[in-house]
Image: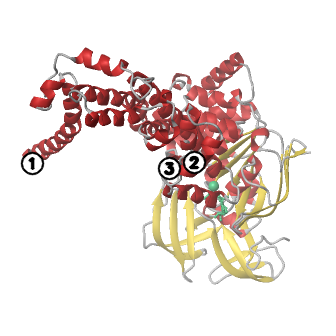
C-alpha cells in the first residue's frame, strides 16, 4: 500500500468556494511529488489538508496506513516549509530548529546533537545565535528547511518555498532540496506554479487546474504525452502552439497546415506542436510564415511568426538562424511529436 | 541648508519647551520640599534646594497619621504599590487570556462577546460603585488587599489592545507552531507572550498608574487605616490646612507629593528597557 493516499478528496471552504473537486492520489514512500498549476488552482489547499491545517470536506487521507482526517496537525509528524518561511521571530535560529524537538520531549543532549547536525548539513552553523530578522532571505530559507529536517518527520511539505528568492539562488536551492531529499529519503510534496521547478524537482508531477488533477505522471510522461490541452499548454516554455482543424483520411487539415494524423476522422480537433518541434526549412515546401518578433536567448532562439491565415506560431531553434523581423520563412513540423486534442473535451485523442 | 538648521532648531525649541513644562513643576515641588514652612509661606515656592531635606522627608515617612494614628506615609506607599501592582498584573494576565480566546478559538459568539466587553468601557467604576461595593462587602472583602484589587482587574481597554495585536500575528506562525507540536497552551506561552512583550510592558505601565491613582474605591473599601493608600493620604494632609493649629506644613506636603510620584516613575524606568527595545528591534 502507498505511503500517502488521497481518496476522493473534496474541499469546500466555509464561504462556499469549492477549491478541490474529487481527487485521488497515491504517493509512494520516499517519493518527491510536485503539485504544479496556475495560481488559485488549489495546490496549497490540497497541501494544507494533508498537513491538517484545513479540514477535509469529503473523502479520506491516509498516511502510513492510517486515516488521518481527524488527527491534529501536531500529531501527524509532518513538517512544512511555508512560502514566507514563518520562522519564529522571537527565537534564535537555534531555538527555531530546536523547538519542534523540544515539544516532542526529546532530551537536551540529543537536541543539541541534532541541531548541530542539521546546521552543518545546511551550512548555517554560524547563524545559530541570530534572530530571523537578522538573516537574508536565502539564510531564512535554510533555517526554515533546517526546522523541517531536524525533526526527521514522516513527510515534508513545501509550499512554494523558493518564490521569495532571486532567480540564481532559486536554482541553487532547488538543487540542494533535491539532493537533500534523496539523501534523507523522506517522502515529500512540493508545491509550485513554476513549471521548470516542477520538471527538475519532481519524481512525479501532479498538474492541477481549477481544483482538478489534470494529469499525474513523471516529468517526461507529462511533457511527451500530455493527456489534456491544459497540461500541454502549461508545461514547457515557450508554450505549445495550437491550431484548430479537422482530421480526414489520416490527415489533419487546418487553414494552412496539413500533417499526417493516425486517428479516426473527426471535426473540431486541435493540433498541438511544441516550438522546438518546428524547424525552419530551406525548401519552400513548408508553411509560409512572416516573422514578427525574435527572442535571442543565447542557447536557443525563439521566433514568433504568423502564417498566411493569421495563426500565431512560435518556433524555437538551437541553430543561430539568421532571421530578421519581417522576413518570410518556411517551417515544417516534426511529425513524430504532434499532439491532437478533442476541441470539446480538451482531452488528447486516443487511437 | 540654513532652512534645515532653522527648522531643526525650531523643533528642538518646541521639544525643550515641552520638557520644561513637564519638569519645572516637579522640580519646584522637590526644591520646595526641602525648605522650612516659614520661608515657604512668606517667600513662596523655592527654586533651589534648601537645608531640610532629611528632616522633612523623615517626618513625612514616619509620622503616624489618620484618626487612630495607625498608618504612616511609608505604609500608604506600600499599600498603593501593592494595589497598583496587583491590579496591573491581573489586568494584563486576564486580558491576554481573554483576547487569546477571542482571537484564536473560533466559537460562534466571539465577536458579540468582544463587543459586549468593549461596551463595558462606557461603564466606569464610578457608575457601578455601589453594586461593586455591595458585592465585595457581602464577600467579606472590605479592608483587604483582595477587596482593593479584585473589582478592578477586568479591563476592556487591555482586551482590545491585545486582541488587535493577536490579530496582526500571521496565521503561518500558528500553523507552523502546530506542526511543530505546540498545543494551544504552549502557543500562548511560547509565542504570544514573548511576542507581545512590548505590549505587556506598555499595558502594565498604564494599568499600574490607573490602579495606583484610584481614589474613590479605596476610600469606600477601607475603614481600617492599615489599608489606606497614598492618594487618600494626600487628601488628609490638605484637610489639615483648614484645621490648622500651627503653621500649615507646606514643606512636608511637597515632600509627600514627591514621594508619591516615586513608585510610578520606578515602574516606568524599570519597564522602559523592554519598551524601547521592542520599538527599535522591529521583529519580522
Ligand atoms: N480560506 C479560504 N476561504 C475561501 N476560499 C479560499 C480560502 N483559501 C483559498 N481559497 C480559494 O480556494 C482556491 C484555491 O486556493 P489555493 O490557495 O489552494 O490556490 P493555490 O493553487 O495555492 O494558488 P497560489 O499559487 O496562488 O498559491 C482559490 O480559488 C481561493 O480563492
Ligand atoms: Mg498557494
Disc 2: which residue: B132
Q: Which residue is mark 1?
A: B3
Q: Are marks 2 and 3 in contact (CB under 8 Å)?
A: yes
If you read the primary sequence from the N terminus, does the residue marked by circle 2 or circle 3 appear first?
Answer: 3
Nearer to us of marks 3 and 1 is 3
Q: Is mark 2 within 8 Å of ligand 1?
A: no
Residue A10 appears in the picture as rendered? yes
Q: Residue furthest left?
A: B2
Which residue does the numbered mark 3 point to in the structure image? B125
Left or right: residue A336 compared with residue A135: right
Q: Are marks 3 and 1 in contact (CB under 8 Å)?
A: no
Gap between marks 2 and 3 measured at Cα: 8 Å
A170 to B102, vertically: above or below? above
Q: Secondary structure at mark 2?
A: helix
Between circles 2 and 3, the one closer to the viewer is 2
Q: Nearer the viewer, mark 1 or mark 2?
A: 2
Amino acid at each position: 500500500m502507498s505511503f500517502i493516499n488521497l481518496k476522493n478528496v473534496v474541499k469546500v471552504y466555509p464561504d462556499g468556494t469549492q477549491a478541490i473537486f474529487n481527487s485521488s492520489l497515491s504517493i509512494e514512500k520516499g517519493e518527491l511529488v510536485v503539485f504544479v498549476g496556475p495560481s488559485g488552482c488549489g495546490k496549497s489547499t490540497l497541501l494544507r489538508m494533508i498537513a491538517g491545517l484545513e479540514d477535509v470536506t469529503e473523502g479520506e487521507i491516509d498516511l502510513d496506513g492510517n486515516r488521518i482526517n481527524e488527527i491534529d496537525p501536531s500529531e501527524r509528524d509532518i513538517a512544512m516549509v511555508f512560502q514566507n518561511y514563518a520562522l519564529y521571530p522571537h527565537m534564535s535560529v537555534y531555538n527555531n530548529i530546536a523547538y519542534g524537538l523540544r515539544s516532542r520531549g526529546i532530551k537536551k543532549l540529543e537536541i543539541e546533537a541534532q541541531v548541530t547536525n542539521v546546521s552543518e548539513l545546511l551550512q548555517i552553523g554560524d547563524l545559530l545565535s541570530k534572530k530571523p530578522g537578522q538573516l537574508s532571505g536565502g539564510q531564512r530559507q535554510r533555517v526554515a528547511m533546517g526546522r523541517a529536517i531536524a525533526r526527521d518527520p514522516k513527510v515534508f511539505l513545501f509550499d512554494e518555498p523558493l518564490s521569495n528568492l532571486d532567480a540564481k539562488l532559486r536554482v541553487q536551492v532547488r538543487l540542494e532540496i533535491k539532493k537533500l531529499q534523496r539523501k534523507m529519503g523522506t517522502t515529500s510534496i512540493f508545491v509550485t506554479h513554476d513549471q521548470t521547478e516542477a520538471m527538475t524537482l519532481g519524481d512525479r508531477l501532479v498538474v492541477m487546474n481549477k481544483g482538478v488533477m489534470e494529469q499525474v505522471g513523471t516529468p517526461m510522461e507529462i511533457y511527451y504525452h500530455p493527456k489534456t490541452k491544459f497540461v500541454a499548454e502549461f508545461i514547457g516554455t515557450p508554450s505549445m502552439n495550437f491550431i484548430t482543424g479537422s482530421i480526414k483520411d489520416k490527415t489533419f487539415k487546418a487553414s494552412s497546415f496539413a500533417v499526417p494524423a493516425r486517428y479516426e476522422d473527426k471535426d473540431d480537433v486541435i493540433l498541438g506542436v511544441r516550438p522546438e518541434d518546428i524547424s525552419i526549412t530551406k525548401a519552400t515546401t513548408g508553411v509560409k510564415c512572416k516573422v514578427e518578433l525574435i527572442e535571442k536567448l543565447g542557447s536557443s532562439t525563439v521566433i514568433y511568426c504568423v502564417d498566411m491565415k493569421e495563426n500565431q506560431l512560435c518556433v524555437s531553434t538551437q541553430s543561430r538562424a539568421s532571421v530578421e523581423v519581417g522576413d518570410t520563412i518556411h517551417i515544417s513540423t516534426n511529425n513524430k511529436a504532434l499532439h491532437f486534442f478533442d476541441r470539446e473535451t480538451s482531452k488528447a485523442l486516443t487511437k | 541648508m540654513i532652512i534645515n538648521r532653522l527648522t531643526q532648531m525650531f523643533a528642538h525649541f518646541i521639544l525643550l519647551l515641552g520638557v520644561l513644562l513637564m519638569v519645572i513643576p516637579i522640580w519646584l515641588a522637590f526644591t520646595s520640599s526641602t525648605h522650612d514652612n516659614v520661608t515657604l509661606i512668606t517667600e513662596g515656592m523655592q527654586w533651589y534646594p534648601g537645608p531640610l531635606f532629611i528632616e522633612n522627608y523623615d517626618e513625612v515617612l514616619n509620622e503616624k497619621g489618620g484618626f487612630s494614628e495607625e498608618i504612616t506615609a511609608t505604609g500608604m506607599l506600600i499599600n498603593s504599590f501593592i494595589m497598583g501592582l496587583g491590579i496591573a498584573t491581573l489586568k494584563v494576565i486576564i486580558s491576554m487570556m481573554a483576547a487569546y480566546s477571542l482571537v484564536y478559538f473560533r466559537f460562534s459568539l466571539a465577536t458579540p462577546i468582544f463587543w459586549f466587553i468593549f461596551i463595558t468601557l462606557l461603564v466606569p467604576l464610578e457608575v457601578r460603585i455601589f453594586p461593586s461595593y455591595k458585592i465585595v462587602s457581602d464577600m467579606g472583602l472590605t479592608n483587604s488587599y483582595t477587596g482593593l484589587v479584585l473589582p478592578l482587574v477586568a479591563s476592556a481597554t487591555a482586551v482590545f489592545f491585545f486582541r488587535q495585536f493577536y490579530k496582526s500575528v500571521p496565521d503561518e506562525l500558528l500553523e507552523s507552531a502546530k506542526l511543530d507540536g505546540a498545543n494551544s497552551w504552549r502557543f500562548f506561552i511560547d509565542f504570544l507572550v514573548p511576542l507581545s512583550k512590548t505590549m505587556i510592558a506598555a499595558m502594565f505601565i498604564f494599568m499600574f498608574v490607573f490602579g495606583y491613582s484610584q481614589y474613590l474605591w479605596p476610600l469606600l473599601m477601607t475603614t481600617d487605616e492599615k489599608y489606606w493608600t497614598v492618594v487618600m493620604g494626600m487628601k488628609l494632609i490638605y484637610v489639615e490646612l483648614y484645621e490648622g493649629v500651627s503653621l500649615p506644613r507646606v514643606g512636608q506636603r511637597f515632600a509627600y507629593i514627591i514621594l508619591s510620584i516615586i513608585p510610578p516613575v520606578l515602574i516606568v524606568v524599570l519597564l522602559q528597557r523592554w519598551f524601547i527595545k521592542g520599538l527599535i528591534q522591529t521583529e519580522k
